[in-house]
Amino acid sequence: MGKLTFSMGGVHPHDSKYARECAIEELPLPKTVWVSMAQHLGAPAKPVVAPGDTVKVGTVIAEPGGFISAFVHSPVSGTVKAVAPRKDLAGNPVMHVEIAVEGDEWEPSIDRSKTLVTAIPDDKAEILARIKACGVVGLGGATFPTHVKLSPPPGKVAECLILNGTECEPYLTSDYRIMLERPKEIVVGAALMQKVLGGCRCVIGIEENKPEAIASMREAVAALGFPGIEVATLRKRYPQGGEKQLIDAVMHRQVGSGGLPIDVGAVVQNVGTSLAVYEAVQKNKPLITNVLTVTGDHLPGNLQHNYLFRIGVPLSFVAEQAGGVPESAAKIISGGPMMGKAVSNLDATTVKGSSAVLYLSEKATRRRRETACIRCGKCADACPMGLEPFLLNRLYKAADLEALEKNAAQDCIECGCCLYSCPAGIPLLDNIRQAKGQVMGVIRARAAAAKAAAEAAKK
Amino acid sequence: MTQTIIWTVAILSVLGLLLALILFWVARKFRVEEDPRIDAVEKALPGANCGGCGFAGCHAFADAAVKASDLDAQYCPVGGDEVMQKVASILGRTVAKKAPQLAVVRCNGSCANRPRINEYDGLRSCRVKAALYSGDTACPYGCLGCGDCVAACKFGALSMDPETGLPVVDEAKCTACGACVKACPKHIIELRAKGPRGMREYVSCVNKDKGPVAKKACAAACIGCGLCAKTCQHGAITVTDNVAYIDPAKCKLCRECEAVCPTGAIHGVNFPKELDKDAVKKRIADRKAKAAEAEKKEAANG
């Protein structure tokens, strides 16, 4: 059998996984942490602590602010200093809870032992409730609340749970490290999610450039013997970790425009999320830690790390612990080089979804000078969603929203393959992202109008 | 040979005549009856087709004006009162006069006032930049300086000042069509009453951060101290979300707010004389002293 992959588009950037041999180290605690209230997709969480309150590791400090939202827990023990806006990664003010660290006292309900708990609770609702109470969100990038994703709407049945271990973004090695160091926990997490979804099969998709991870996961699956879990080797190709691409690669099914994975019977979760689910359900440990990679191009080995960090630690502290910002760094990126965001503010704090601090040199980040489109069609070849980026770019410039919608600008997953492949250096992604935003606005307005009309008709 | 030429000319002439007749007949038979007033109104309009009135163009505006029962909902910002009076007289209606407006850029963040803290190497577009992050200064509310407003202006009324990095409005050319207001992702530009002889006072800042934070980001930010609101005798100034706003309808152009503003966030333009801050401050102090005295007297009497 050939190796699995998605059916169209994609690019092959060098994988640059320089930090792959760095074992996960625990990041020391700083003096102060700032925990963001907007760490997940959806409504920001509502703080439930006030300045002066004493918190332990794992104390709830914020409640969900809506249906799609999540609990936030204190990552440290200490005193709440302030609940105030602070600048996030992009420099925009976001509500943060500031906690001064004192000692490291954990909530007694959290099981901190290393023993593997493999017994799966019988009650589905209880598993789901624990996932929700522990504030688990998707750690693959979008930070979508996990309990919402694991509750398919009535009438939809999950046939396959796909665990995303592709880590197709260059440079990132955090998922790779947890697959090597904690494979059994991940498999138990998968079994828990299988249970919630009603016993569907589970495929753990890993790209071929991580043979050690594949072996490690296979061994864990065999050792634990949960039914219906298998490991699939995928060909190396970006953006394989995209939800729709991964479903295509593993199940050979395509999610339609505007559709959700559950429409084709799939639920996709990151391996990191699976680990968080294990810790939440079996150990009662909320999502207060995650693993991030500190790496860069042409960095000496001693500056590369994989850290187990407490959420809310400032990026500047991470950088300092990792040996300081190297001189060669022209740009610091949070996340991978393809979809990550340039950091304009190193005082910003880490959030649940932080996956990397990446130092890129001038040469690696320089924007190419834009020249005229030569109609080579490389962008259309590279687009994994089957869009025509050159056309969308032109329609955006002509502000033709109707045509943009017809040509599915709203389906863009912002993977950046078009921009990566364009020989003319045209800022395709920047423009299409704008177009997508505008089209989504039109679609939402239309849906709201239709809803209002339907309600008016009812009356 | 001659015959061929004669025949050709004759046939073509007859054919031309026939087709002309058909066209003439079709034009009469299938003529679209349009209110002649639409045409008349359209001719009275400036013909800029800028969309500032909210309609697709001047024809759409004229069409709507003729069909609507009154002109309350319609106003051509480019033509102003003069054109609206013409339109009203064509349609035999009356129209209320509106104070002429102007685009006003409410940001003080010049390179000197607002130091750059990082370097932006992305696409030169405010909309793209705003979607990526808060900008290359510490102020997440201020002008991004990529000139989307300049590109949106159809009248050439906006230009970027290379020294300050901020857009400048050419008052003679601005028609208050509002294209720049829509183009600015930071909502800095406001359409404001032009004021008598162009004189007006406005707060040139939209920073909602608390005083110390705003001040750190930009030397000329509005810090929401409320001194202007306290000084204003006409109740024209309100402070919401740490930003002051001067209501042009209530402002009497006394310039006292401008004199007391500690950061210089309040701007007065087109005044014949330069503001003598000390004189104005003295005037305010005198007035306060008098008021205090009067109060004392009243207390003594009462």
Image: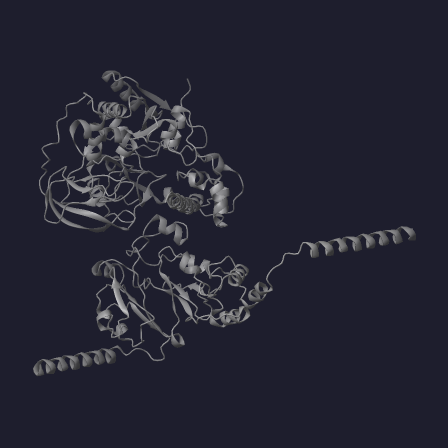
Label total for image: 0
| A388 in relation to A157, above or below | below
Q: Depth check: A454 or B205 in front?
A: A454
Q: How is the image coloured?
A: one colour
Residue A203's image quarter? Answer: top left
At a point 52% along the width and 44% down the height, the residue shown is: A373
Return the x and y of residue A333 as percentages of the image width and height: 31, 43
Q: Is residue B245 visible?
A: yes
Q: Position of residue A420 (x, y in %)?
A: 43, 39
Q: Quadrant of residue A27?
A: top left
Task: Give how far across and how far down residue B121 sits, in percent.
Answer: 38, 50
Q: Position of residue B189 (x, y in %)?
A: 37, 62
Q: Is residue A294 left or right of residue B145?
A: left
Position of the C terminus of chain B by quadrant: bottom left
Q: Is residue A20 visible?
A: no
Which residue: 27% across, 61% down? Answer: B218
Say above or below: A230 vs A74. above
